[in-house]
Amino acid sequence: MELTDIIKAENIVSQKSKLITENVMHYCPGCTHGVVHKLLAEIIEELDIQEKTIGVSPVGCAVFAYNYLDIDWSQAAHGRAPAVATAISRLQPEKYVFTYQGDGDLASIGCAEIMHACNRGENIVVIFVNNAIYGMTGGQMSPTTLLGQVTSTTPHGRDEKLNGFPIKITELLAQLDGTCYVTRQSADTPGAIRKTKKAITKAFQNTRLAKGVSIVEIVGTCSSGWKMSPVASNEWMREHMFKKYPIGDIKDI
């Protein structure tokens, strides 16, 4: 029996989405972004909305997201993705518009943008990957960096008296009347990945209900910025990140 004899549709349990391009991803080994990209591709394909979806990626590790997902994209300045997404959604209300942002982008330079977009209740989806560090620009402290966490700008650990406290930005956004669905998930285990996929799917489906902003935060790892192996990064995330950023739905109306 040849291998080709058993490669049949009924025997395939997992396969690459047609929306994932052949370009080699630039992400570091163990990076959560690659998993989330795969989920986005699967969801858009399963919902059959490739021609109706527009992604907005600002500056950060996901700046080249347009190289990996075969959908329409718009580039935004650092932190300004919600403003760009607002314009696209208002001009093309029939589209599924989403932003793809990291914690440095969304919770720091883009804090005002995301706050006001959520307060206005724009009909967009926000995919927010929180790895508590500026991964692309050298591993600096971000607004979500944990107390005591070592970064390139906090070599002795984040000090609340000097650097302030970590911002639970997703909980803040959930308080705004313009948000309809706010959840925090992860992608460290197969079970967690399935829950994240379900959450992102629901967020996209909410677009047609026009109830406001849907936010899916994914607590992720940054092996290179954290100076850990992928395995150690997942373990550190479970032990430390989940305590500050607990997994689960925060708002669902």
Image (cartoon, rainbow, N blue to C red):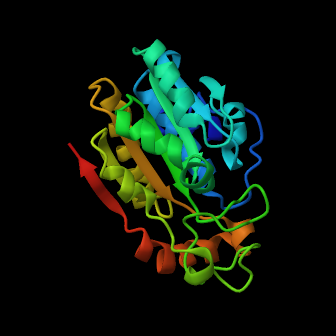
Number of marks drawn: 0
User: x, y (%) of residue 120?
Assistant: 36, 33
Q: In the drawing, does residue 27 fall left or right of residue 12?
A: right
The residue lying at 59 percent from left, 28 percent from top is 19
Image quarter in which the N terminus is found = top right
Residue located farthest toward the front when viewing the structure as drawn: 161
The residue lying at 76 percent from left, 35 percent from top is 23
Q: Quadrant of residue 104?
A: bottom right
The residue lying at 75 percent from left, 73 percent from top is 153
Residue 184 visible in the picture: no
Q: In the drawing, does residue 78 fall left or right of residue 189?
A: right
User: x, y (%) of residue 135?
Assistant: 71, 59
Question: Residue 40 versus residue 140: which sits nearer the camera?
Answer: 140
Residue 57 visible in the picture: yes
Question: Residue 195 versus residue 80: which sits nearer the camera?
Answer: 80
User: x, y (%) of residue 15?
Assistant: 55, 39
Above or below, 76 against 25 in this view is above
Question: Residue 194 versus residue 112: which sits nearer the camera?
Answer: 112
Image quarter in which the C terminus is found = top left
User: x, y (%) of residue 70?
Assistant: 63, 25
Question: Residue 185 versus residue 47: which sits nearer the camera?
Answer: 185
Q: In the drawing, does residue 67 fall left or right of residue 159?
A: right
